[in-house]
């Protein structure tokens, strides 16, 4: 009996591996069919996530519109995609200069895209601007710029493309947001405010356009990690604050986030929260035990600033 079990174990593992391989291949082919010939707009294609989304959707046969603030970097991305693509299965991407913090140009970009392709099937709002610092040291002008880039820019582009989706009764809008759309973190007041605003807008929009078969999806990772930064085993002090933010700071790799965006499009998911257990616990803590959450955050601020505890 024991010998039989030992012999069966490798076969069982081999069978499981085979099933996983088949599942991955089916998922890959399903992903391709979900975006093939679809017009897909990526609002910040030159970011880490934007490049990975461009790669995944281009391989899937989408008609890409790659937007970004830097033309030279857009051309580099274009060359990278074309160099590895099969011309018989992919389409040549269209490049568009777009700075979402400049609201005045957004309508023109939407018109350019619609004039070129006639429609937009999938809009991926992944452009974002970050700022970190004490609220009283961030100028109001910079606060406004953050809101333009992270809130007014995306909703302006969405509103410009939405009537076409409604008239065709099809389309999908994906907002790549952040955990800070669900809870506020000190020294990121403007950024967190913009992310809260964006999430609120698209949550409301989801209900408004459901009857037109337009899908609104939100993907909220902790952070999109840099290609060059990986979590280390550093000597962290024994602190709830430091433990929490160690888990929070090292976010999702761009390639993993792009694959999740593709799955979200394929399955038409409404909301995805990409985080390990610690940030997820923080969101629930903020919801059900707000006073405890505020105390932990305040403790961390005092620790960071070196403020002595009262008493």
Image (cartoon, helix red, strand yellow):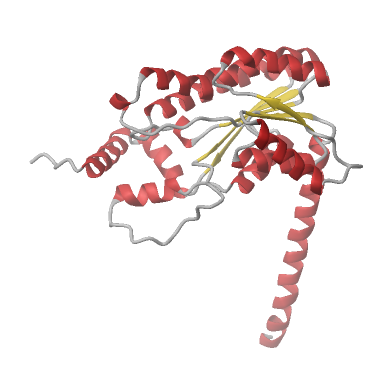
Residue 94's x, y, as percent? Answer: 77, 29
Looking at the image, residue 210 sits to the left or right of residue 101; the answer is right
Residue 80 quadrant: top right
**Which of the two residues, 241 or 118, is positioned nearer the viewer here?**
118
Looking at the image, residue 151 sits to the left or right of residue 138; the answer is right
Looking at the image, residue 94 sits to the left or right of residue 88; the answer is left
The quadrant in which the C terminus is found is top left
Is residue 183 in view? yes
Residue 199's x, y, as percent? Answer: 52, 25
Q: Is residue 31 above or below residue 8?
A: above
* Residue at left offset 73%, top offset 82%: 7
Q: Is residue 237 above or below residue 150?
A: below
**Which of the two residues, 208 or 146, is positioned nearer the viewer here?**
146
**Which of the two residues, 2 or 113, is positioned nearer the viewer here?**
113
* Residue at left offset 50%, top offset 41%: 223
Residue 182's x, y, as percent? Answer: 45, 31
Looking at the image, residue 125 sits to the left or right of residue 113; the answer is left
Residue 281 quadrant: top left
The quadrant in which the N terminus is found is bottom right
Residue 209's x, y, as percent? Answer: 67, 17
Total numbered circles = 0
* Residue at left offset 46%, top offset 32%: 130
**Which of the two residues, 245 or 282, is positioned nearer the viewer here?**
245
In the image, farthest residue toward the front = 72
Is residue 159 in view? no
In the image, farthest residue toward the right = 88
């Amino acid at each position: 009996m024991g010998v039989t079990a030992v012999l069966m174990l490798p076969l069982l593992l081999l069978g499981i591996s085979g099933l996983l391989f088949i599942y991955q291949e089916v998922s890959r082919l399903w992903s391709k069919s979900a975006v093939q010939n679809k017009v897909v707009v990526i609002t910040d294609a030159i970011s880490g996530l934007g490049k990975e989304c461009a790669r995944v959707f281009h391989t899937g046969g989408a008609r890409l519109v790659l937007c970004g603030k830097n033309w030279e970097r857009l051309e580099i991305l274009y060359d990278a995609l074309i160099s590895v693509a099969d011309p018989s299965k992919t389409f040549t991407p269209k490049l568009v200069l777009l700075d979402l913090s400049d609201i005045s140009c957004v309508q023109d970009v939407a018109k350019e895209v619609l004039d070129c392709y006639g429609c937009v099937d999938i809009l991926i709002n992944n452009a974002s601007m970050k700022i970190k610092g004490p609220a009283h040291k961030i100028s109001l002008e910079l606060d406004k710029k953050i809101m333009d880039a992270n809130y007014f820019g995306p909703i302006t582009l969405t509103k410009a493309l939405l009537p076409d989706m409604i008239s065709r009764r099809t389309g999908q809008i994906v907002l790549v947001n952040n955990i800070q759309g669900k809870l506020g973190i000190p020294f990121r007041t403007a950024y967190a405010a913009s992310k809260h605003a964006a999430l609120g807008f698209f949550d409301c929009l989801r209900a408004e356009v459901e009857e037109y078969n337009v899908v609104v999806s939100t993907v909220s990772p902790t952070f999109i990690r840099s290609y060059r930064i990986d979590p280390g085993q550093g000597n962290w002090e024994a602190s709830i604050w430091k433990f929490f933010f160690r888990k929070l700071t090292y976010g999702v790799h761009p390639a993993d986030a792009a694959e999740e965006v593709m799955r979200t499009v394929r399955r038409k998911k409404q909301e995805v929260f990409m985080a390990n257990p610690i940030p997820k616990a923080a969101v629930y803590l903020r919801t059900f035990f707000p006073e405890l959450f505020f105390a932990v955050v305040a403790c961390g601020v005092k620790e960071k600033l070196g403020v002595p505890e009262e008493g």
